[in-house]
Image (cartoon, helix red, strand yellow):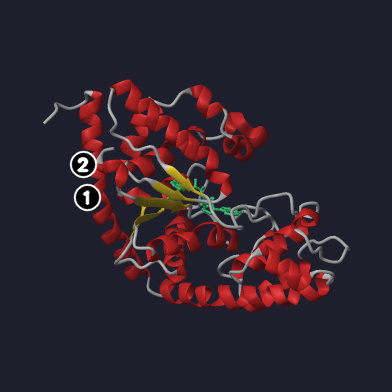
Amino acid sequence: MSDKTEMKRVFSGIQPSGQLTIANYLGALKHFVQLQKAGTECIYCVVDLHAITVWQDPNELRNAIRHAAACFIASGINVEKSILFNQSLVSAHAELAWIFNCVARMGWMNRMTQFKEKAGSNRENSSVGLFAYPTLMAADILVYHATHVPVGEDQKQHLELTRDIANKFNNDYGTEFFPVIEPVIEGIATRIMSLRDGTKKMSKSDKSDLSRINLTDDKDLIVKKIRKARTDQYPLPGSIKELEKRPEAKNLMNIFAALSETSLNNVLNQFEGKMFSEFKPHLSEVTVEKISPITTEVNKLMNDGKELDQILDAGAERARKIAEPIVQKTYEIVGLKETR
Ligand code: TYM
């Protein structure tokens, strides 16, 4: 095995489109912090080039980028230890994405379920960027030779495509240049569902604000959203098997378990036979307890936009040092540039 494959390097990203939610926190940010704490080299990115695959108001985008960065920091990302920056500051992402556009096959891209969901019936009118989005995502990861990618369940297919692209590139050019990545999809919060519909993913782009808890929501709003969260009329079950048939109960109990860092079994034991009216205030309490300190910190950081910009600039400089030589080497392998 080469040194490259033995080294562990984490990369992940979050789009600055809409407010970050408790699902982004539980499905992604929380794990980013854990990996950082474990001492792994981590590179985290506000993926602004991905955000513009659908319309973003230019007057709001810059602030949304800062806001997403503030959410990373407020959740516990230490910008001395980990690299934090926004994607458009490092042109190597877009450069490698073009090479990957020439490696990935139309057939592979046509199978991407997220494109189908996002484009919906409006496929003909979607941006080419939205269709090509997964090759940019592969480039985000592979431009750092990252090996481990913590994400929620919804990104699994994109990571499989990243592996396919790395394998095809390596095969086509007779090299082992790109590592075959490991998705890190762990814990019970890999797929948090909408508060309005237990069969639909919680999303920052959902039309209904009541469907999610944002990292900017204050105590009153959190309590209101949980009070209004959809439920069925039965008492809470006591086993995972029964819970599987109850999407809303499963979602709320999962959120409770993830926030209070306990197992789903413990939550089932604690609330078996109780009504939602009794459970919900407990859920509100633990949500406020976990989310409010993050919100307060985000607001504090947002008061100084300049400082956030400096943090992102400094992170980008560190990121470029890793990414640029990898793009140059890729150009050599492809034959665009003389081998040194
Ligand atoms: P994005 O911005 O939609 O979401 C950011 C992260 O949050 C996770 N997530 C969820 N986890 C659990 N339950 C949910 N309901 C939920 N909704 C979102 C996502 O899985 C993700 O980890 N394409 C990516 C961004 C990206 C990226 C990358 C990620 C671009 N390049 C390279 C990893 C590596 C996205 O749109 O995430």
Q: Quadrant of the C terminus?
A: top left
Q: Residue at x 32, y 35 (%)?
A: 178
Q: Is residue 29 visible?
A: yes
* Marks 2,1: beta carbons within 8 A: yes
Residue closest to the eye, 234 or 128 = 234
Q: Is residue 110 left or right of residue 4?
A: right
The secondary structure type at the circle numbered 2 is: helix
- Please rate how many residues cluster around mark 2, counting C-alpha atoms within 10 Å: few if below 14, some from 14 to 19, many from 20: some
In percent of width and height, residue 85 lies at 34, 57
Q: Is residue 148 above or below residue 83?
A: above
Residue 249 is drawn in which quadrant?
A: bottom right
Residue closest to the eye, 65 or 273 = 273
Q: Is residue 40 left or right of residue 250?
A: left
Q: Residue at x 64, y 67 (%)?
A: 257
Amino acid type, callout 1: Lys
Q: Is residue 173 above or below residue 264?
A: above
Residue lying farthest to the left in this orientation: 340
In percent of width and height, residue 280 lies at 75, 72
Q: Is residue 263 left or right of residue 90?
A: right
The secondary structure type at the circle numbered 1 is: helix
Residue closest to the eye, 258 or 207 = 258
In percent of width and height, residue 304 lies at 37, 73
Question: Residue 325 bears which disc, if any?
Answer: 2
In percent of width and height, residue 172 lies at 33, 21
Would you name the residue on which mark 1 appears?
321
Amino acid type, callout 2: Pro
